[in-house]
Amino acid sequence: MLKRTHLRELTLNRACMNIVRAKVRSSDRTHHHYQEPCPTRVSRPKLRRNTHPIHSLPGELLAHIFILGSNLDVVFPIIVSHVCSAWRDVALHTPSLWRRITLNSNAHYRLDMWRERIHRAKVCSLDIEVGAFPSHCGRKPPKSYFDIHTVQWHMHLVLSSISRWRSLKLSFPHYAPFLWNAALSTCCGAGRGVYAPLIEELSLVYSANDDTKVFTLFGGVAPRLSRLTIDGIRLAWLPSLFGNLTFLDYTHRGPIRGNQAVALILDMVEVSSRLQELRISFPSYANDLRPLPGHARAHKQVTLPFLGTLYLRIEGPDIPYELYSLLPHLTFPSLISLHLLDLHRSLHTFPRLGSFLQVFKPPPSLKYLWMECGWVDNEILPSMLRSLKSLKRAVVNGAKVPDLYFARSVARPANLDQL
């Protein structure tokens, strides 16, 4: 009978380890002689990303370019700040880029945006525009309609920063009652809260106004104000406000007419005797058949010693009585540029032109003359040009000169460079 054999446990002894090592070494030698085929390498040109030259400009120059663009388009700062992180960093660190605040009739939907722009301007002075203004970038401006509530809402947004205003422009194209009162009443108080120490330019245009209220702006304190455009508003003409004006664009409207209007304008320009450019416009009165005065009324004589440019604008079919009475009482010893504009684009000469040129004679210092439409009389033009000994250039626009010979030979004096 066979005996059951006993199972022995497998133990790893030295002999077994030598056998395993020999097997592993022979396998390594076999694998060493085998080489995988090298992958085929294809040479491809690397695409190099060219950097646009504008990204190489220093930040200061880039900021200046942005500021120039913001003068043409009010949303330009927002556009450039969303181009890339570098431009956004430049925009956010340029406070003057955000100084222009333009509030139209639709701006109440974006008041938070305008508050943020005022915040980004930091301590920089502000240019405030409320109303309808033409676009300089070809974009069609939105249709605007203003009432007293809209105007008050907009002014409330910017009045807290009145001490930072560099300019204020208000323009209302359509009639609504009490617009000036809504816009300017809080600017007419007393105390430092309404002072405008930084304001340099003021434009107030509302030709449909029928309110005769006289406004005293900024508590009478605006020492830097140098440019003023007004149409359809009456202002208290204080020396502390308007004594430093160098530019005045004045359109006379309202119930004051005739000699009262002449006296009013003479008082204004006497206070603003430092004017270098003056633009005067009168409205067209229907059926204005008042005869011209036979002699000058006893008004004061005012001299504007620094005035170099004068614009006379006529809105109607003839020269108004007020302009005929005003000009003889003004003296311009330094006048070099005279612009006679006809906004009505008359097809015929103004009936009162001959009488007007008898009382208003351009000064001999005149070097540039621009005449339009109703201001041109072919019979008066030759003698007028010959009397201006210093005249260098004359422009006749919107009127027919009889022939080339008349323009070059008869009407052109020897000192005239261009006609």
Image: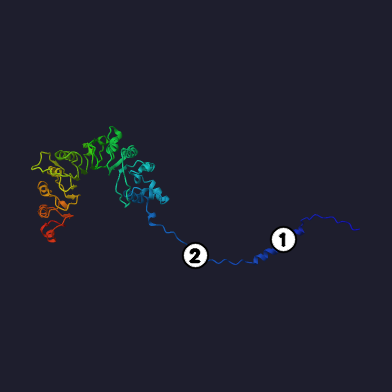
401 horizontally vs 211: left or right = left
**Quadrant of the frame with the N terminus:** bottom right
Residue drawn at 73 percent across, 60 percent down: 20
Image-based side of 223 in relation to 76, left or right? left
Residue 227 appears anywhere in the view:
no
Please, is residue 181 above or below residue 137 in the view? Answer: above
Front residue (pair 255, 259) = 255
Label for residue 228?
none
Residue 358 in the image, given as x and y percentages of width and height: 9, 47
How many residues crowd around disc 2 within 10 Å: few (fewer than 14), some, or many (20 or more)? few
Residue 10 locus on image (x, y percent): 79, 56
- The residue carrying mark 1 is 21
Mark 1: which secondary structure? helix
Looking at this view, name the residue that lies furthest to the top.
Answer: 190
As drawn, which residue projects farthest toward the front?
287
Question: Which residue occupies the foreground of this view, 407 or 192?
Answer: 407
Residue 405 in sight from this viewpoint: yes
Q: Is residue 211 above or below residue 68?
A: above
User: Where's residue 387, x and y in %?
Assistant: 10, 52
Residue 95 location, quadrant: top left
Amino acid type at image mark 2: Arg
Q: Earlier in the sequence, mark 1 or mark 2?
A: 1
Query: In terms of depth relative to the viewer, which is nearer, 270 or 210?
Result: 210
Camera-near label (1 vs 2) is: 2
- The numbered disc on residue 44 is 2
Residue farthest left in this picture? 294
Kindly report the distance in space between the C-alpha atoms of the residues bearing marks 1 and 2: 47 Å
- Under circle 2, the secondary element is loop
Q: Amino acid at mark 1?
A: Arg
Q: Quadrant of the C terminus?
A: bottom left
**Which residue is located at x 29 percent, y 38 percent?**
183
